[in-house]
Image (tube, helix red, strand yellow):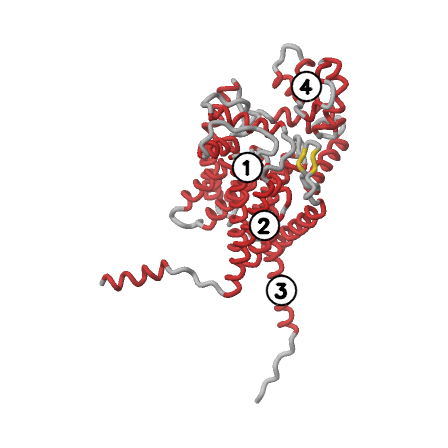
Amino acid sequence: MSKEKSAPARKRLTRPNLTAGQTIAAVLIVFIVIAGGIARNTAIGTNTHLSADENGYVGNTNRILAGKHYATFKWPPGTSLAFALATRLSGHHSLKLARGASGPAQYTQLAAGVLTLILVAVLAWAFAGPWAAVIATGLVASYEPLIEATRTFLSEPLGALVLLLAIAAALLARSRYGTRNELLWLLLAGVIGGIACLTRSDMAIGMAAIALGLALSGRPGWRTGLLRGGTYLVALMLVLSPWLLYASSEEGRFVPITTAGPDAFFIGSYLPGKGELVPTEEKLAPEVCRHFPQDCGRYWQQSSAPVFRLIEARHPGMSENAAVTEENINYIRKYVLGKPAAFASMLWSKFWKMWTTAWTGGNGTYHPDTSQAQHKIYLIFAVIGLLAGIALTRRFMLIVSAAVLLAVAALATPFNDQPRYNVSLMALLLCSGTIGAWLAGERLLAMWHERQAESAPAAPVVS
């Protein structure tokens, strides 16, 4: 009797048989992941400039390691928590912010990059097969800005990973629709969505798009759709709530993940500065110099703080946040309502530039390995593939990926967006674009075969 029971058990544990083509594809993917990891490891230690964002992430990391209050809520906690964990596991008690760094933060970025490649391969294989997985993994592995981001203290590598994880978790939850445990899978997906929001706050709108997609998928009744979308959002909010309560308590006002929104909108809505940081600082430099002579010069290379001290000086008696909020209201009246065509043109220009320009290091630096041609070729392929896949297959994976990418990019546009903001989105775009292109190709080939069969002359009937 025991032998009869053990045979099925052994069968269940047997590895799936791969065809020769699948085996070759799997081996290629392993080599691509290794090569991508080596390229990212080679980038470590080569950073020549440190940005204000990097200073913020490292400052918060060290406050976490020291058990002190969070330093600033302008940045979400996910990246700093990851850096703090890596620093502690490596036996250190603080993280050093330095050019040419090769410490726990950079190896956290390396791990995130390799895990991203593995996840891209899994998703592409699951939805479009082994050779689509080879192509998608190769594109993400060789995309230069994702390689160079490994050397930084920025959130883009982790952001790329958690965005893919959020999509994967949502797709897994959707695949369990109609089963007894579907709500548990939706809860898990919501938890991962909450982690994505805590890593990069701009992804919150993307998680809302996922919740909407999960609610509408399969055209359920309104109660079922509301239950599914609501379950996802409840889990997401349970993850966010401790952070929101802590940050709001520390700041004495409600903090929607970060406090950077008003400052970013101030920069992004300033029409004379084209909605960009450096041109805005240059436009306001004369006024800054009049009020704060010590801050004259190319101060924007270090910090935009003098600009916001200027805004506070314009509104005596107000806090900096209240002064910036007041300026934002004025800008809405002056530019959004007063010059809607010019403002819309500025937003479109920023949106276009964010997608069509490769991040090269930022803050006046340029990495020689960055290729604008590579970025544009990859971008065109991915966008056409994604749109073609949606048009010809209507696959939920493609639709929800497109919705998330569009929502995150559109939300960034009225704020201080820049080419760096596309780095955390490119892994998902290249993955879903490759899947879309492959599925569209298969669909077109099937349609061609159907037409050939229909047009073929009927075989003569032999009596």
- The mark that comes first in sequence, 4 or 3, is 4
Mark 4 element type: helix
* Residue identified by numbered label 1: 106
**Is 61 in front, or is 16?**
61
In three-dimensional space, the C-alpha distance between marks 4 and 3, rounded to whole angstroms, equals: 60 Å
Q: Left or right of 271: which side holds 179?
A: left
Q: Position of residue 12 (x, y in %)?
A: 36, 59
The N terminus: image quadrant: bottom left
Q: Is residue 394 above or below residue 17?
A: above
Kind of residue indicated by mark 2: Ser
In three-dimensional space, the C-alpha distance between marks 2 and 1, rounded to whole angstroms, equals: 27 Å
- The mark that comes first in sequence, 1 or 4, is 1
Kind of residue indicated by mark 3: Leu
Q: Which mark is residue 432?
A: 2
- Label 1 crowd bin: few (<14), some (14–19), many (20+), radius 10 Å: many
- The mark that comes first in sequence, 1 or 3, is 1
Q: Which mark is residue 445?
A: 3
* Residue identified by numbered label 4: 306
Decide if residue 407 is in sight here: no
Mark 2 element type: helix
